[in-house]
Image (cartoon, grey):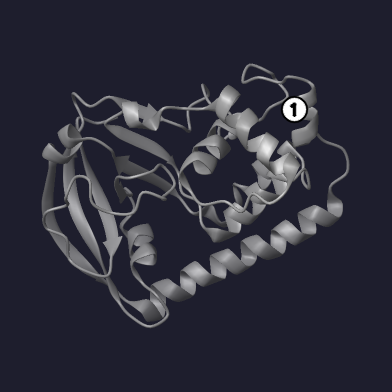
Amino acid sequence: MEKKITLFHGSEKVIEHPVFGAGKKHNDFGLGFYCTESEALAKEWAVSSLRDGFANRYTLVTEYLHILNLNSPDYTILNRIDVLVEHRLFSIKTPVARRAKQYLIENFSVNVNAYDLITGYRADDSYFDYAESFLNNAISVELLSQAMRLGRLGEQMVLKSQFAFSNLKFEGFSIAEKDKYYVQRKARNDEANQTYLKMLDDETDGIYMQDIMRGGIRNDDSRIPRYLSE
């Protein structure tokens, strides 16, 4: 990673001074300041169907930051799902889903709070549907890995520590027009859902959550798909 990078944060307002400890704790990687290196992607995140938004631009000095890259070959799709399970609000309604959540935490947990900066793919509501289906033993880990690549939501970078915040500098902003960027975001999401439904019809064999638990499968098992950009 470069020693200084440019980041964008999509928001309904201009944020000149991001506040450490502010925000929602039930985001993909927990509490933090969520950014992307793509200005266009930040603009999609900034808009709703009713309003324009802003792509706030920053520079971040990364030279001394402790960085976690969840897209590296060191991590599997189950590390990614565990991070979501531990931080986002999932609907855990069945005994198998409760056991699955506990198994993931015990065997695939990643301590994201030990890092200054985290890089990983973004999830949205559709992606939580895929994850919930996997926890409930309804889809295989192979289909889960394919589904989590749908929609091309892009990579996000999350500042997690006071030290990371101290290395962030506001550089300006640009307007995100809802008539352009909300339409793009919705079209991508709709396409992902349609593709997922087709994938469900085509799926045959695979490894399911029950198989993983019963077989005592761990992170070093070659049958578990690696990182999402693979």
Residue type of the residue flagged with mark 1: Ile
**Residue furthest out toward the top:** 220
Position of 155 compared to 80: left or right? left
**Residue furthest out toward the right:** 204
Residue shown at 19% from the left, 55% from the top: 57
Q: Residue 105: which quarter of the image?
A: top right
* Image quarter hosting the C terminus: top right
Task: Establish if 57 lies above or below 4.
Answer: below
Instruction: Where is residue 194? Give x, y as percent.
Output: 70, 65
Task: Establish if 78 lies above or below 192.
Answer: above
Position of 136 compared to 167: left or right? right
Q: Residues within 10 Å of mark 1 (few under 14, many from 20)?
A: some
Between 171 and 24, the one nearer to me in the picture: 24
Residue 74 seen in render:
yes
Q: Residue 220: which quarter of the image?
A: top right
Between 183 and 33, the one nearer to me in the picture: 33
Residue shown at 69% from the left, 42% from the top: 97
Residue 228 seen in render:
no
Residue shown at 24% from the left, 31% from the top: 2
Task: Establish if 20 lies above or below 2.
Answer: below
Position of 110 compared to 11: left or right? right
Instruction: Where is residue 201? Give x, y as percent.
Output: 85, 56
The residue carrying mark 1 is 212
Between 225 and 163, the one nearer to me in the picture: 163
* Image quarter hosting the N terminus: top left
Residue shown at 28% from the left, 72% from the top: 53
Instruction: Where is residue 99? Give x, y as percent.
Output: 69, 35
Task: Establish if 28 lies above or below 54.
Answer: above
Between 183 and 17, the one nearer to me in the picture: 17
Number of dots carrying numbers: 1
